[in-house]
Amino acid sequence: MLLRAVNVSGHNKVNMKAWAARLASLGCSDVTTHLQSGQAVLSSDLDPVTLADRVRVDLAEGFGVETLVLVRTLQQVREVLDGCPWPEHAASEPTQVHVTFVDGEPFKPWWRSQPDRYAPERAVDGPACTYLLLPDGAGRAKMPAERGQHATSRNWRTVRTLGDLLQG
């Protein structure tokens, strides 16, 4: 499970320990949170859409935070990990490869119209995601953040760790 824009610069504060307890109260089991930026690995009998809706409501009620909640299954995370267009770069520089997970339709191909404008940065569509190669880091990226999209990004190291946690 991924939350968008929590615990960033003091905004949308969500205590991960408290969030884990709230997830358990929603019927989730085996809850593990990762870092402070809104990731959790868990088990649930609910389908992903229902779970995301319940968590979204609970975050608003319990923390006063209204944000995007994306739920990805183990199989979906495996597809993202297996589909990386730059596996060697991801292995050697995992914080320069990012995955932007999208809710619904993938990003508009804004980067396709002017790929030279953003070089050496690159973007490639993936399974319900866009892979980004940001050699100078996310903070110095020339590629614009996609506005109005329902999405959240994680660097490759975090995505790989979430995959490992899902594997158990």
Image: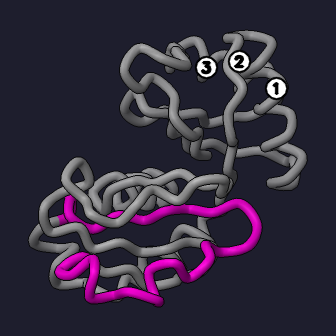
Secondary structure predominantly adopted by residues drawn in magenta: loop
* Three-letter amino acid code of the residue under disc 3: Trp
Return the x and y of residue 111 as percentages of the image width and height: 44, 80
* Three-letter amino acid code of the residue under disc 1: Leu
Secondary structure found at label 2: helix
Return the x and y of residue 109 as percentages of the image width and height: 55, 82
- For the point 44% across and 61% down, the residue is 163
**Which stretch appears magenta?**
94-121
94 w.r.t. 54: above or below: below
Return the x and y of residue 99 as percentages of the image width and height: 43, 65
Alpha carbon distance from label 3 to label 1? 11 Å
In the rendered view, how is the structure colored?
one colour
Q: Is residue 76 left or right of residue 103?
A: left
| Circles 3 and 2 in contact, beta carbons < 8 Å | yes
Q: Which residue is mark 2?
A: 22
- For the point 61% across and 19% down, the residue is 19
Label annotation for residue 19: 3
Label annotation for residue 118: none
Q: Give the camera-side residue of 49 and 96.
A: 96
Alpha carbon distance from label 2 to label 1? 6 Å
Q: Which residue is mark 1?
A: 26
Return the x and y of residue 55 as percentages of the image width and height: 77, 32
Q: Give the camera-side residue of 34 and 93.
A: 93
Secondary structure found at label 3: helix
> Number of labelled discs?
3
Q: Which one is in front in this view, the residue at disc 3 or the one at disc 1? A: 3
Q: Is residue 97 magenta?
A: yes
7 w.r.t. 103: above or below: above
How packed mark 1 is, by other alpha carbons closer than 10 Å (few <14, some 14-19, many 20 or more), is some
Alpha carbon distance from label 3 to label 2? 5 Å
